[in-house]
Image (tube, rainbow, N blue to C red):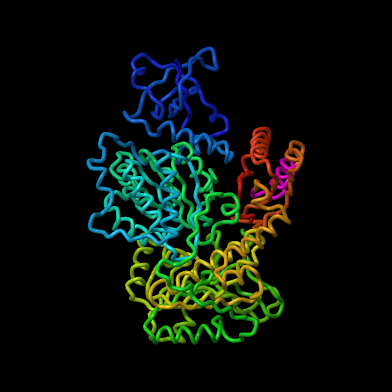
Amino acid sequence: MYAQVLLAKPARSTQKIFSYSIPDNLKEKLVVGLQVLVPFGKRRDIGFVVGFSETAEVEKTRDILEIFGDEPLFDEKQLELAKWMAEYYCCYLMTALKLMLPLAAVSTKHQITNPKQYQNPNIQIPKLKEAQGKALVEISKAIETKLAETFLLYGVTGSGKTEVYMQAIAKVLELGKSAIVLVPEIALTPQMVERFVERFGEQVAVVHSHMTLKQRRVARDSVARGEKRIVLGARSALFAPVKELGIVVIDEEFEGSYKQDKSPRYHAREVAKKLCEIHRAVLVLGSATPSIETFYETKNRLSLPERINQQPMPAVEIVDMRKEHKGALSQKLRELLVETFEKKEQSILFLNRRGFFTFLMCQKCGFSFSCPTCSVSLAYDHNEKKLRCGHCEYKIDPPKSCPRCNEEALRFFGTGTQRIEQEVAKLLPKARIMRYDRDSTSKRGSHERLFRTFSDGEADILIGTQMIAKGLDIPSVTLVGAVSADIGLQFPDFRSAETTFHLLTQVAGRAGRHHLPGKVVIQSYTPEHYAIQAAAKHDYESFYNQELKNREELSYPPFSKLITLVISGKNGAKASKIADDLAVFLRKGLGTGCQVLGPVPAVLSKIRGDYRYRILLKGKDLPAMRELVCETMEKTVVPTDVRVIVDVEPLGLL
């Protein structure tokens, strides 16, 4: 009997699985998941036991030297998921397996003392509306029969999806199983945590990146010991060591934050499907605006067409900004802000940019300031009074005259949260104004503090980026203004219309969710666009039908699968040569019906001094495309100063 060991340091030369002999003193102790010390060449390396075999791939094997710890750091099911991820996302097995590893060794000796106390007995469980009840029945059937089914729970904002989640989870807990609940933004976590803790008490473990290392270790250990049966958090919560998984819920499943931007470049939705298949658990995808792919591919659709309190959807007015000539706020939005403030109600202003102004440009010759190491314009930071790059640390003082023509004709263009804050303050000097963007939430705990301040009515107007578009449920919010509704439509990406529709529909849903009627103003320079029109009508299906037609004509997902390769390096000529070589090899191996597009300079052609080139594979046979890419990467000699990133099913093409 030989132990199959995977070395802990991922590299092309060490990512095969090696066979080691098992000394007599370790034969009774060795199990899958243990961390071991093994000889490798002239050195000693850390590895993990990933299996056993009767034969070895070499004639002479070497002994395992030592075992670290008494408990395995992952189990067979986690290993199975890691192997699937490594194959699906074209990454090293160890890279995927690291997602499963605990922050510290855990003990599994303690179990739940009273699993029947799964809900707070002092909380009145609300009676479900008819549509909610029907959805719960279908989900419960799958839970009881242990079918790995996927459900799409969709409906208008405020239709009660969270209550369906919680009652389905209660069913899972009654059966002695566990649940994972994913939310897309850390900003949404405080309100969701509040609701789940109120219902389920100490059964809930919260996991997200803004927690301290110690907090995450404590939460993970309590899950591993079976003391907590509900894991709530961002995408990394998917890899918590839950016992007897019964359900995974992904709230706002369309969100781009569910896609990881470093290896392994996984999407939580696809990994959750595999995880539920392994555990024979149920997956519930929830959203008022499902992704095009999810709506197209999911057969079990559960609709919630009305708000649970019978409140009508907020009235939406589109303002044509081509007819407005003063400031970033239209006359209509200004009037409603004043009216809402005088009624002592709250307002939300949404825009998809942060910073004070977007860029500085010469009105005489058209010169604009760009980062010397990144192919992007410099944004003006009002606090620092500097132009700075959003991708690196480069920043400069704004000059008085144009470097190109020497004319004093430099003007700021664009709109950001800081500029809107200044405009609103002039309009309503007595209003209490809050900004909610990445600049104002960079410190640990800032999300919770800002959310609590606004929800407690200690601010009148909340100005923010897309972080405020989802999840916030505050009774006094009656006005929402989308200041720069269509800026996302200008992005060179086939998903730009979908992203715009999602954001507008979600942010409009923050208004009038309780007893007070809501109003929404959408400011747009392209008011006739179908994404703007559908969002104003709260009409997902009309948008879906038009977008699906466009996708089919261009053969984009869900009618094809995509893989991108981004080749980058300080030496642009060398990176370009490697990109050309990769494209030639890929074209030789691709079968009928697949395309290799490029290489071309990426939209962001230079970041932090690295020149970037992109190759796009488009086709229907994703397994064949993945296999070809992996084969190409194995056979291509890539210099150490050139980097190749493989992204399977990318969300963006920048």
Residue 389: x percent and y percent?
Answer: 56, 64
Q: Is residue 543 left or right of residue 383?
A: right
Q: Is residue 493 left or right of residue 112?
A: right
Q: Position of residue 320 (x, y in %)?
A: 62, 80
Residue 567 shows in the view: no
Magenta stretch: includes residue 227: no
Which corner quadrant of the image does residue 164 belong to? bottom left
Q: Main secondary structure of the magenta part?
A: helix
The answer to whether 27 appears left or right of 20 in the picture is: left
| Residue 312 horizontal/vertical position (percent) | 46, 73
Seen from the viewer's position, the closer of residues 639 and 623 is: 623
Region rendered in magenta: 568-583
Closer to the camera in the image, 281 or 337: 281
At a point 44% along the width and 41% down the height, the residue shown is 281
- From the viewer's perspective, is residue 388 above or below residue 237? below
Q: Position of residue 619 (x, y in %)?
A: 70, 45
Quick one: 587 or 366, which is closer to the camera? 587
Q: Please report the residue visible at 56 percent of the width from the left and 50 percent of the height from the top.
A: 298
Residue 208 in the image: above or below residue 586: below
